[in-house]
Amino acid sequence: MTSHVMNTYGRLPFALSHGRGCRVWDTDGKQYLDGLGGIAVNTLGHGHPKLVPALQDQVAKLMHCSNYYAAPLQEALAAKLCELSGLQNVFFCSTGLEANEGALKIARKFGHDKGIERPEIIVYEKAFHGRSIATLSATGNPKVQAGFGPLVEGFVRVPLNNLDAVREVARTNPNVVAVFLETIQGEGGIHPTRIEILQGLRQICDQQDWLLMLDEVQCGIGRTGKWFAHQWAGILPDVMPLAKGLGSGVPIGAIVAGPRAASVLQPGNHGTTFGGNPLSMRAGIETLRIMEEDGVMANAAAVGARLHAALAEGLQGLSGVKEIRGQGLMIGIELDRPCGALLGQAADAGLLLSVTADSVIRLVPPLILTAAEADEMAGILVPLVRAFLATPQP
Ligand SMILES: *Cc1c(COP(=O)(O)O)cnc(C)c1O
């Protein structure tokens, strides 16, 4: 049958029909344990009994209105995000790349405002920031960029966890205005920026009058056991793009800004039709409220640690397992070989997961995962990985 959907994804041959909690069912009735959460999106799992009625209520009341009017739900969600982050104000959009695109605009205008005509931004090897022309240019993956040149200029790339490289740029490049990185790289293979590196970057940015911009699109919203992953380092960013988990499945993005970045964008500088619509705002407000009410973040920390430990124990001594990384419910298992085939094998065994950076198994399940479900997940995955490593691949 001819498909009328553009062929841009490698898709498995089944369709999901519905879900409940951390379980989903396909159209043939087969059940899966959800280790992927729609790629770190379904914070509260599927069909959450508190979220669903709130969204139904909002759909019936008002889904969309333009940004011509006062926006009390934007005010409420922005205030909550500022309370949780210690930052100052928020611009709402609909996706991660949009949040990052806006952050890049803030950095450039921050530079222009202080007389730097060709502002440049430090970005990282293996970074992923999205697939618009500017964000794919900031991305450190040649596969994402191939075929889409000319790339946007104004990026300087350095290796992760290397402060000397940043200091060297500071010494030689007067046009730099910002450092832009994922607190924990997601698509690049679950690579955390070390705590002392984050603290060092904060210090360099203060000394240089640069913006520290932390892309928490994937690692934010409680996933690591703190509201935002950089909070483990006790620092504040100047700009923090968010998206994925903030709406528990309803598309939403946000740029959260601290005092140095909060008034860079002025009326007329930025905007979006869908951004801040009542439905996505309600989804964000209810997600954060339910997380607080039900202790979801503490659950992510505890169940994440349990899952991590179970995987480490189960995979112990396997030479094909290079490293198990991550924090809370953001876990990457790096193998010594490409393992894309595990996607289908895991699905056959009733587990949804993803493989990123060719050889890293990624688990980013809903943050409501129970201890029993974590044990079940490890119980499916460990023998799969063992069998995979024991079988010579074609
Ligand atoms: C997914 C992701 C993006 C892009 O988000 P989209 O909503 O797909 O545009 C950007 N940055 C990071 C860290 C991501 O994980």
Image: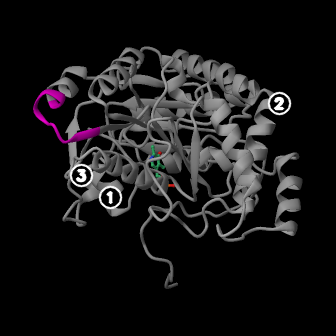
Residue 134 is marked as 1
- Horizontal and vertical percent for residue 97? 45, 55
Q: Earlier in the sequence, mark 2 or mark 3?
A: 3
> What residue did someone put label 3 on?
142
> Start and end of the magenta stretch?
169-177
Mark 1 lies on a secondary structure that is helix
Q: Tell me if 364 is positioned left or right of 118 in this view.
A: right
Query: What amino acid is at disc 3?
Result: Pro
Of 86 and 44, which appears nearest the observer? 86
* Residue 392 part of the magenta-drawn span: no
Query: What is the CA distance from the residue labelled 1 to the residue labelled 3?
Result: 14 Å
Mark 2 lies on a secondary structure that is helix
Of 67 and 337, which appears nearest the observer? 67
Q: Going 61% across and 63% down the picture, which residue do you hit?
A: 14
Does residue 274 sit above or below 322 in this rendering?
below
Query: What is the CA distance from the residue labelled 2 to the residue labelled 3?
Result: 42 Å
Q: Going 81% across and 68% down the picture, which residue do you hit?
A: 62
- Horizontal and vertical percent for residue 234? 51, 17
Among the 4 quarters of the image, the one containing residue 176: top left
Q: Tell me if 140 is positioned left or right of 232 in this view.
A: left
| Closer to the eye: label 2 or 3 | 2
Q: Earlier in the sequence, mark 1 or mark 3?
A: 1
Q: Going 60% across and 49% down the picture, which residue do you hit?
A: 348
Query: What amino acid is at disc 2?
Result: Asp
Q: Residues within 10 Å of mark 2 (few under 14, many from 20)?
A: few
Can residue 48 be seen in this snapshot? yes
* Residue 175 part of the magenta-drawn span: yes
> What residue did someone put label 2 on?
294
Query: What amino acid is at disc 1?
Result: Ala
